[in-house]
Amino acid sequence: MPIPFSYDVIFVIVSAGMILDHLDNCSFYLPLHPEFRRAFEFLSSTDFSKLDDGKYPFEDSDSFVIVSTETGRGKAESPLEVHRHFIDIQFVLSGNEVMGWRNLGLCHQVRSPYNTEKDIGFYADFPSSWIEVPPGNFAIFFPTDAHAPLAGQGSIRKAIVKVSVR
């Protein structure tokens, strides 16, 4: 299904790169990366009730989607994580998702060193802000954004598009 592009009034938080918005407004972000069109078309056109949890690669691309159902850990048990080779588009399907955010340049307390093979590192720094991400909304985290997902409570189902920056 094609995604229309419009400059209608939208709700968005942009903070040193991180973006929070509703899927209805995804066309606004298409110019930010060549793979965003494919990512948002997948999120907009997929019936996730018929899709099992798992990893779904995009054809002819290093980008992929992870669909997962997990239990929220709460703020105290959700460490900041970072990625260097992928942008995360975390789209909440159901549940009470809360995510922490901190500019990577302000993170100094390494919890687990960056693992190149898994494209992830962890920091013990505390997020500078917390955001609620209700179902139907997405958060985009760039490599300059440390983020703490699954800080909500209860069962959380989401689709995480991993957009390659290579």
Image (cartoon, rainbow, N blue to C red):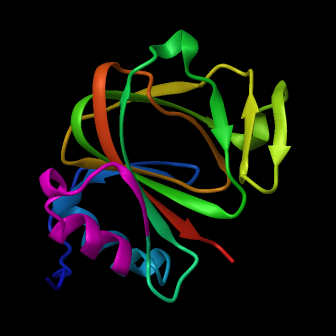
The answer to whether residue 12 is seen in the rendering is: no
Q: Nearer the viewer, residue 161 or 141?
A: 161
In which quarter of the view is residue 27 placed? Answer: bottom left
Q: Is residue 118 above or below residue 94?
A: below
| Figure quadrant of the C terminus | bottom right
Residue 6 in picture, x, y percent from top left: 18, 77
Instruction: Name the residue located 18 percent from the left edge and 66 percent from the top edge.
Output: 46
**Residue 79 drawn at (x, y percent):** 63, 24
Q: Residue furthest bottom?
A: 60
The stretch drawn in magenta includes residue 52? yes
Q: Which residues are magenta?
A: 38-56
Relative to 124, 73 lies left or right? left
Q: Residue furthest top?
A: 76
Tally of marks: 0
Left or right of 81? Residue 140 is: left
The quarter holding residue 74 reads top left
The quarter holding residue 107 reads top right
Quarter of the image with the N terminus in it = bottom left
113, above or below 39, in the image: above
Question: Residue 113: where, in percent of width, then height?
Answer: 86, 37
Asked if residue 157 lies left or right of residue 49, the reply is right
Which residue corresponds to the image point at 13% horizontal and 61% vertical from the top-left?
A: 47
Relative to 127, does residue 162 appear above or below in the rendering?
below
| Residue 81, above or below 27 | above
Which of the two residues, 84 or 21, is positioned nearer the viewer here? 84
Identify which residue is drawn at 39% across, 21% down.
72
Residue 6 belongs to magenta span: no
Q: Residue at x 68, y 52 (%)?
A: 83
Residue 13: tell me if it is visible. yes
